[in-house]
């Protein structure tokens, strides 16, 4: 089935500024002031420990609940119509999608796409399930926007309507096309985590060595 991508439109960038930054920094899940190779040709002064965050039930709850409440208020105030389902990439986006569905206003389903040699795809068992559904795509960190875009494309390919996207963090000022022209993107904070393309990284220019060779610097408790 072909994808009917909507025409490029003004994606709305929304946030739920709150106290979550303190919680995740206190627990050491996001550290700043380094020089990290985060992959995909990007460098950053901050590192996000996604996996331990996704495994921490309190962090999951504290981070997802305000996002779910924001979505509920958008439904309630008719800023958007109902949400039928959340969809995310297995595993990170799936965990967030699942948590959001727990706090949703009405019964909301949860689907996941998996990495295949053809890109992100839903399992065949989901093939009819998304048809006609209004879906919010969930992710953990947006850097290039590829994951959100591919999941959004897959939802549309299955006959669903993508009504928005959520992610905990945004690293770069990705444009609407990079994100698959989703109507809105909801993140935890308005500001992006400081990130640069490797070629324009000011830390490289200053000669600051990478925090370690592979950009991975797990504190002992995560090793
Ligand atoms: Zn650099």
Image (cartoon, helix red, strand yellow):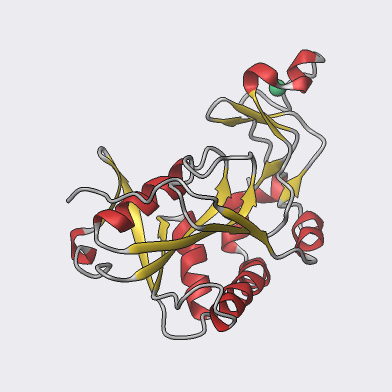
Side of 167 relative to 2 (left or right) = right
Instruction: Name which residue lies at 64% across and 42% down.
Output: 171
Left or right: 9, with 71 as reference point: left
**Quarter of the figure with residue 85:** bottom left
Q: Position of residue 203 (x, y in %)?
A: 78, 22
Q: Position of residue 177 (x, y in %)?
A: 47, 41
Instruction: Please state, as top left, top right, bottom left or bottom right, where the C terminus lies in the image.
Output: top right
View quadrant of ligand 1: top right
Residue closer to the observer: 89 or 142: 142
Locate residue 67, reporting x and y percent: 62, 69
In front here: 46 or 9? 9
Residue 184 position, x and y percent, is 54, 58
Q: Name the residue: 78% across, 63% down.
A: 23
- The number of discs equals 0
Q: Name which residue lies at 65% across and 60% down.
A: 14
Residue found 30% across the figure and 64% down from its top: 160
User: In the image, 212: left or right of 22?
Assistant: left
Q: Is residue 166 above or below residue 178?
A: below
């Amino acid at each position: 089935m072909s994808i009917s991508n909507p025409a490029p439109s003004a994606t709305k960038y929304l946030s739920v500024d709150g106290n979550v930054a303190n919680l995740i920094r206190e627990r050491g899940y996001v550290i700043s002031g380094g020089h990290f190779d985060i992959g995909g040709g990007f460098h950053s002064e901050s590192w996000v420990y996604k996996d331990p965050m996704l495994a921490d039930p309190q962090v999951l709850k504290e981070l997802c609940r305000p996002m779910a409440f924001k979505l509920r208020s958008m439904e309630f105030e008719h800023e958007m119509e109902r949400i039928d389902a959340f969809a995310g990439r297995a595993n990170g986006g799936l965990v967030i999608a699942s948590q959001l569905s727990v706090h949703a206003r009405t019964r909301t389903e949860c689907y996941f796409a998996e990495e295949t040699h053809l890109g992100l795809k839903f399992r065949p068992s989901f093939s009819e399930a998304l048809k006609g559904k209004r879906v919010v795509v969930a992710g953990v960190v947006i850097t290039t926007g590829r994951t959100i875009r591919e999941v959004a494309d897959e939802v549309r390919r299955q006959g669903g309507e993508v009504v928005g996207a959520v992610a905990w963090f945004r690293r770069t000022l990705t444009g609407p096309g990079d994100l698959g022209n989703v109507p809105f993107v909801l993140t935890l904070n308005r500001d992006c985590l400081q990130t640069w393309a490797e070629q324009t990284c000011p830390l490289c220019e200053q000669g600051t060595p990478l925090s370690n060779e592979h950009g991975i610097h797990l504190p002992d408790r995560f090793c």
